[in-house]
Image (tube, grey):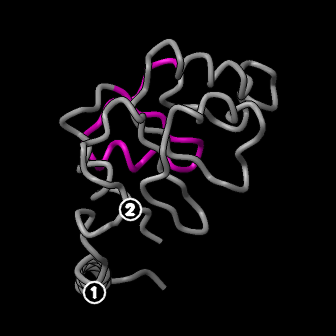
Amino acid sequence: MAMTRKHCWKFRTRRLENGVKLLQQRGRVDADPIVAKMKEYADRTHWVYAQYGEGIYPFQAHLPMPPEIAAVSLKRYWSGQITTGEIVETCKRYQVEQVLLDPARTGNEWKDFLTNYDVVYQNPKSVLYVAKRIESSGDLKIRK
């Protein structure tokens, strides 16, 4: 049996109302600790790299990523179009000031590169590194 226009309108209205309620219940992006920490260094940041799955954070913090590695899908890894080593080299070339990595997926390729960075924020799924050259004169504290 086909829905009448009246029933269709009610269904759409309820769906919209439920969507609005869900959005209102979500936290604000500015309240996210990773975004807040990235913004803390924004005035001294030209480039950011965020590992696959973390790319929304630089966008929310209004920080640019090097174009070659801004959207790296797993398919590019699987197909051999890009390697972690190439990403690290791109980060070196652009001298990225902030690096956001998933500790479970951070291999040895990052080890030497990250010696010039300090951890400024971490949680079980993300670690934010900031280049030592842009740190403020104050002490950095790792927030967990």
Q: Is residue 57 left or right of residue 103?
A: left
Write the residue at 18% across / 36% down: 43
- Nearest the viewer among 69 and 45 is 45
Circle 1: element type: helix
Q: Amino acid at mark 1?
A: Arg
The x and y percentages for residue 83 are 74, 24
Q: Amino acid at mark 2?
A: Lys
Can you tell which quarter of the image residue 41 is in?
top left
Write the residue at 49% across / 51% down: 119
Relative to 111, residue 81 above or below: above
Which circle marks residue 38 in the picture? none
Q: Is residue 33 left or right of residue 43?
A: right
Relative to 26, residue 106 above or below: above
The x and y percentages for residue 48 are 40, 33
The disc, 2 or 1, on the residue closer to the chain's N-terminal end is 1
Residue 52 is a magenta residue: yes
- Crowding around mark 1 (Cα neighbors within 10 Å: few <14, some 14 to 19, many 20+) is few
The x and y percentages for residue 66 are 43, 22
Of discs 2 and 1, which sits in the foreground? 2
- Nearest the viewer among 77 and 102 is 102
Residue 5 is a magenta residue: no
Can you tell which quarter of the image residue 32 is in?
bottom left
Residue under circle 2? 141
Write the residue at 60% across / 68% down: 124
Q: Is residue 104 left or right of residue 143?
A: right
- Crowding around mark 2 (Cα neighbors within 10 Å: few <14, some 14 to 19, many 20+) is few
Q: What's drawn in magenta, residue-wise?
A: 47-68
The x and y percentages for residue 78 are 81, 32
Which circle marks residue 14 in the picture? 1
